Image (cartoon, rainbow, N blue to C red):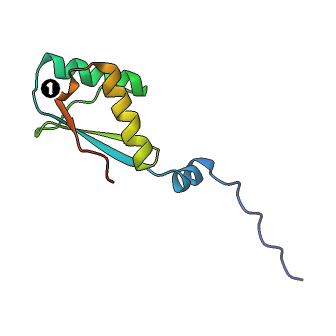
Amino acid sequence: MSRLPAALPPPDWRSLRSALVPLTAIVVHVTRPGRRADELLAAVAKHLGRGTQIPDEQGYVRILLEQSEDAAWQRVHNALDAAGDDWHEHLHVNPRRG
């Protein structure tokens, strides 16, 4: 008598979601370190709903978002614009690829 195959385990929706949603890293470079740069990074983190990230030794902050590259870039730029008009004086984000 042949055995029936074991039932498949239920899908792990977290891993399935990771396979379907791209993970994009947007890199922000702190070009003018100081209190204002820290305030801007904190405001961006709050806008994105996460904790403030500390720049690495070269002044880079990597923001990982589960979005397409264009959507992630736009979301970070919206957060920077909401943080203050002067963000260009303290931070740099590469232009969106065209």
- Residue shown at 18% from the left, 31% from the top: 91
Total labels drawn: 1
Q: Residue furthest front?
A: 98
Q: Residue at x 36, y 27 (%)?
A: 79
Residue 46 located left or right of residue 54: right
Q: Residue at x 90, y 83 (%)?
A: 1
Q: Is residue 89 left or right of residue 65?
A: left
- Note whether 84 is above or below 23 in the view shown: above
Where in the figure is residue 65, as x and y percent of width and height?
41, 41
Which quarter of the image is occupied by the C terminus?
bottom left
Position above or below: 3 against 37: below
Mark 1 lies on residue: 89
Residue 50 x %, y %: 39, 27
Q: Position of residue 87 (x, y in %)?
A: 22, 25
Q: Secondary structure at mark 1?
A: helix
Can I make out residue 1 in this image?
yes
Q: Is residue 77 left or right of residue 35?
A: right
Q: Would you identify the image quadrant in which residue 53 lies?
A: top left
Report whether residue 65 is seen: no
Closer to us: 34 or 57: 34
Q: Amino acid at mark 1?
A: Glu
Nearer the observer, 18 or 12: 18
